[in-house]
Structure formats: structure tokens, C-alpha cells
Amino acid sequence: MNPAWSLPTRPEWVEELNAFGRQLGNPAALVALDEESLLATACEISGLADYGDGRWREGLRVFLRALEAEADLNLLGRIMARNDIVRALVNRLEVRATVAAHPEITAETIEAPLLVVGTGRSGTSLLHELLAQVPGHRVAQTWELLHPCPPPERATYASDPRIAAADQEYTFWHLVAPEYRTMHENGGDVPNEDPLIDMLEFASDHLMGSYPVPSYTRWLSRADAGPVFRAHRQFLQLLQWRCPGERWVLKSPSYLVKLPAFFTEYPDATVVLTHRDPLKVLPSLVSIMATLQQMHSDTVDVDAIVKSAVFGTGIAMDLVMGWRDDGTLPDDRIIDIRFADLVADPVATVRAVMDRSGSTLPADAATRVARYVVDKPRDRHGRHDYTFADTGLDLAETRARFAPYQLRYDVPSEV
């Protein structure tokens, strides 16, 4: 397997910064990623010290070891990694302190949430954003996921200064890798994914996807997701405490393989499962993962990313089909949505989700959904170019691998 897709050239300023780090011979001397330093810095920033017990420390240690042993971080990568880790630690300290000071937060009810899942690049972001247009639906925006404390207030939700801070962080991503803007919508006030919540437990697919850390990926695949989803519930309780909605709409493609644990924590949830031709999904997924890793590392193995994407996507599909057949998952609480139908008629798709999940789509909400599609067309930040040939995979062999999935869900081929 020889992928044809190659990594884009980094901006000159990124190359110069990383060259400076290599010239020093030891970027670690400039940017420490040891546990003691990270914990102490977060305590200093927050003025707090109670991290609490739990498996999160194991996740942190596995991730730190993987960063040093496997990730080949350049200087900018070390800076970005330290920022990710310290922010998660500060958030953990502040969330714990806020809940301790206001125990009534834990009495907040999370009722019948909607979770959008599906293979990466299968329309999960679009559907999540469209469902956010429905009055009463509560989504988590980037700013409150990155900076949850103090908890958001309804009166200042749209004007909170943390929106600009989160927006600035993602603008920096675009300076590091300009092509990333064509791949995924970002911004401080844009709905974002739940793995940012899981960062506080250091059991997050955000870390797995952003850094080349195979040992952490293996650890995460075996980790008990139960405690992670219990912490996830408390995080939602905190966000809605002073800024409630009628129903949470969540999104995380990576929760596909964690659906049994998700339903254990949220038994009244409804899962919306998006479907798209895997041979169209895979090259897009590979390019975005490679781009994210290149932000941080001087060693990005595209061949390994391709293998991981094929394996992970196939396993996820097989598991979900099996779980639905044997009753592990409540099949009547899963709504299947084809990407082709979503693109062809977004309003009808949102209406179908609402109907199947026990509610209706008001006329004014239908208008908002239609307007959102018009106001935010695809490729507005440039075209994300990719083809199946870029993966280096054999088309017939890969098509055969995913044939049972396509047959079951009547997923049309796009390649």
C-alpha cells in the first residue's frame, strides 16, 4: 500500500520555528511535558489543587509517555500539546471546584438527549449544526467546551468574551495548517464534539486523532468508558445549570464503538446514525488526521493512518451491526440517516429525526434549517480535494470489505 496523498507544505513561519527547535537539539528543554510540571502549572493558573481520584491519571500518564516515545513532537507540537494538557487540567480543577461549591448542579436533569454519530466525514457535523437550529435544542459550542468555568449564563451566552478566545485558538490552527479550514468548520461559537469533554478524564479521541500516539490509542480502546460518561453527564449538568435548553444534541463520531456505555449512562437517549460510502469517507478521514498530526509532529506516517482508518472504520461498523442484532443496543432508539438524503433534502432529514425522536419540527425551525444551508454552503472556505486513489488501497478489495455494511443500510456507492 503506497498512498498517493502527500502532506502539504508547512507555512514558512512554522518551518522556521521548528527548525529553531531542532537547532537547540532538545525542544523538551524549552517546553516540558512531564506530569509534575503540567500539574503544577494548572494549579498555579487556577489557584486550585483538588484533582480528585480516578483512572484519569493513568490516561494522562499513558498519553505523556506516548508523546515522548512515539509522537516525535517538534517545537510547535510541544507548545500545542502543553496547551491542550494544561487547559484540560485547569478545566478539571475548575469543574470540580464549581460543583463542590454548588452541589445543586448535580441535580440537573439530562433528559432524552440526541447523539449524532457515524463514520467520520459522513455528515455528522452538518446534521449536528442543522439540529442546533431547532428552538429548545441545546448544543455545546466550542468556547464553553474549551472554557466551561465559570458556567455559561443565558443572558450573556452570545456575547461571552470566551467566544473570541476560543475563536482565536482555532484561527491559530488555520495559521499552522491553512488547508485545515477547508476540511472542518471551526470557530468559537460553532457546535463542537464531545471528546473535548472527555479531555478532563484524559480518555479522549481528540488526543488520539491529533497526535501520533499508537500506545495511547490501544489503551483508550480498552479503557472503561463508564466513568468517562459519568463525568460527561456532570459536565453537561454544569453547562446547562444557568443556560438550560429543552434537549441536548450531542455529536461524536468516535462514540460509535462506545454506544453500549453511552446508553448505560443515558438509557432514554436517541442515537442518530449517519451513513455514507466508506470509500468516499476514508480518503477524507485520512487527509484530516494526517493534517492534524502534521501540526504537531515531524513524523507523520500516512500509510499507518490509512491502515488505522480502514481497520477502525470496519470494526466500528461491524460492532454496531452486531450490537443491534443481539440486543446490546436498543435498535428502536437508533435513527439511520443516509448522507445522500441529508444533502438532497436537509429539512426533510431534520424533520424525520424530530418525528422519530418523539417531537415535531416547527415551521419557523424548518425555515431556519433551510436558511442555514443557504448561508453556509459547502466549500465556502475552499475545496477539500481528495480521491480514493490517494489512499493507495485496492478499490475492489476495500469495496468488498464494506459490502455488508452498504447492503444493510442501503448506502449508495460514490466511488
Image (cartoon, rainbow, N blue to C red):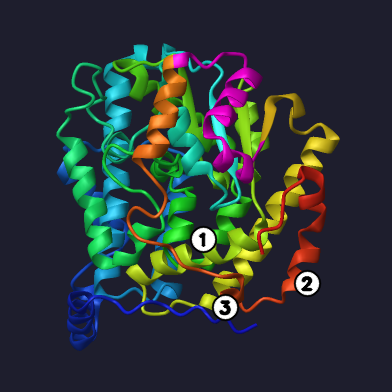
Q: Earlier in the sequence, mark 3 or mark 1?
A: 1
Q: Residues within 10 Å of mark 3 (few under 14, many from 20)?
A: some
Residue 315, placed above or below residue 322: below
Q: Determine the residue positioned at 57% across, 49% down.
A: 122
Task: Name the spot of residue 23 as percent of width and height, x first.
Answer: 19, 88
The amino acid on which the numbered mark 2 sits, given as a three-letter code, is Glu
Q: Earlier in the sequence, mark 3 or mark 2?
A: 3
Q: Could you say which quadrant of the image residue 162 lies in?
A: top left
From where the camera sits, is residue 138 visible? Answer: no
Name the chief secondary structure element in magenta.
helix
Tell me where the magenta segment starts and ends, as one range: 337-363
Q: Nearer the viewer, residue 198 or 53?
A: 198
Residues tagged 1 and 2 counted as in contact (Cβ below 8 A) = no
Q: Earlier in the sequence, mark 1 or mark 2?
A: 1
**How many numbered discs sit on the rendered protein?**
3
The amino acid on which the numbered mark 1 sits, given as a three-letter code, is Tyr
Q: Could you say which quadrant of the image residue 158 lies in?
A: top left
Q: Which mark is residue 303?
A: 3
Disc 1 secondary structure class: helix
Task: Name the spot of residue 359 as percent of width and height, x first.
Answer: 57, 13
Disc 3 secondary structure class: helix
Residue 34, placed above or below residue 250: below
Tell us which disc is closer to us: 3 or 1. 3
Q: Determine the residue positioned at 32% across, 40% down.
A: 142
